[in-house]
Amino acid sequence: MKAGEIRKLSDKELDAKLLELKDELYKLRFQQAINQLDNPMRINAVKKDIARVKTIMRDAELHGANT
């Protein structure tokens, strides 16, 4: 997911997206633990998406921008 796409989301959508990504990361780590993970690079991609969402949420908080 690109940062431009994330910036277009509202605060509630950002919260929902963050929860969705955290849940996906949990499931991927579980699959990795039981050796059923097909694409290990997906874990890194999800972590980066979580960081992007958190960064944009923090940016909106600091600048008072209501996205």
Image (cartoon, rainbow, N blue to C red):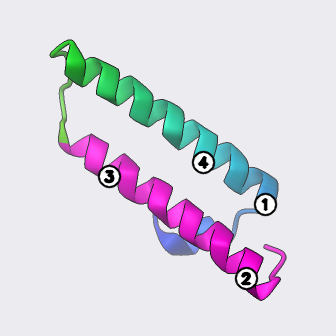
Please name the amino acid that badge 3 sits on. Answer: Ala
The reply to whether residue 7 is in sight is: no
**Which one is earlier in the sequence, the residue at label 1 or at label 3?**
1
Residue on which disc 2 sits: 62
Q: Residue at x 49, y 65 (%)?
A: 52
Q: Secondary structure at mark 1?
A: helix
Q: Which mark is residue 59?
A: none
Residue on which disc 4 sits: 18
Label pair 3/4, CB-CB below 8 angstroms:
no
- Residue 48 % position (x, y): 38, 58
Q: How far is the residue under mark 2 from the one under mark 3?
A: 26 Å
Q: Residue at x 40, y 24 (%)?
A: 27
**Which one is earlier in the sequence, the residue at label 4 or at label 2?**
4
Q: Which mark is residue 11?
A: 1
Q: How far is the residue under mark 3 from the one under mark 4?
A: 14 Å
58 vs 21: above or below:
below
Query: Is residue 2 located in the magenta-colored stretch of the structure?
Result: no
Quarter holding the C terminus is bottom right
Q: Secondary structure at mark 2?
A: helix
Which quadrant of the figure has residue 57? Answer: bottom right
**Which one is earlier in the sequence, the residue at label 2 or at label 1?**
1
Label pair 2/3, CB-CB below 8 angstroms:
no
62 vs 44: above or below:
below
Q: Which mark is residue 45?
A: 3
Q: Which residues are magenta?
A: 41-67
Q: Residue at x 80, y 52 (%)?
A: 12
Please name the amino acid that badge 2 sits on. Answer: Leu
Which quadrant of the figure has residue 49? Answer: bottom left
- Residue 63 % position (x, y): 75, 87
Q: How many neighbours does mark 4 have within 10 angstroms: few (below 14), some (14-19), or many (20 or more)?
A: some
**Count of marks overlaid on the render:** 4
